[in-house]
Image (tube, rainbow, N blue to C red):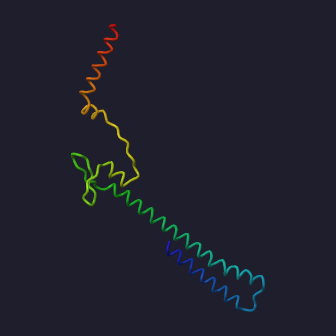
Amino acid sequence: MLILTILVMVVAVAVTTVTWNIIDSESVAVGNYLAIVITGILTPIVTFLFSAVVIKLKCSNDELKQALSEVKELQSLLPICASCKKVREDDGYWLQIEGYISKHTKTEFSHSICPDCKEELYGDFLRDIDKQKAAVERSDRAV
């Protein structure tokens, strides 16, 4: 991109120089004179606008590269505790995995409980409730 911008600027300077050299000669007709003046004015303007667009594209490209590098960071090895599942950051602090992912991405979490954990944590309690419900239903049918 930089080479293309420099090339356009060199061509613009050359055209402007040639234009002003032609204007200096006395053999220029009025119509040609006007065309040459317009060309001499428009060429630097177009060059400036083109350079501005190239600079904007370069900035956008740099931002995209930065975003891609941040995404790639999450694709590398992630030190995670085998017991509590906290993640170690580069500075040595340990974060809950939800906090780590939220900090490094735009992800938000909602929590639920999987069937295996539900059974492990609340299995006895849920079975007791089911037994109580069954007893109430039997007593309601008996009445």
The answer to which quarter of the image holds residue 74 is: bottom left
Which residue is nearer to you in this view: 15 or 93?
Answer: 93
Q: Quadrant of the C terminus?
A: top left
What is the x, y in percent for residue 20? 67, 87
What is the x, y in percent for residue 59? 48, 67
What is the x, y in percent for residue 84? 23, 46
For residue 39, side relative to residue 56 (left or right): right
- Residue drawn at x 23%, y 27% is 124
- Residue drawn at x 75%, y 92% is 26
For residue 46, side relative to residue 117 (left or right): right
For residue 63, side relative to residue 5 (left or right): left
Q: Residue furthest left?
A: 83
Please tell me whether residue 112 is drawn above or below residue 129 in the rendered image. below
What is the x, y in percent for residue 53? 55, 69
Please tell me whether residue 38 is drawn above or below residue 105 in the rendered image. below
- Residue drawn at x 70%, y 91% is 24
- Residue drawn at x 30%, y 49% is 97
For residue 32, side relative to residue 88 (left or right): right
Which residue is nearer to you in this view: 10 or 71?
Answer: 71
Q: Residue furthest front?
A: 143
Please tell me whether residue 10 is drawn above or below residue 72 in the rendered image. below
Please tell me whether residue 35 is drawn above or below residue 98 in the rendered image. below
Which residue is nearer to you in this view: 127 or 20?
Answer: 127
Q: Residue furthest top?
A: 143
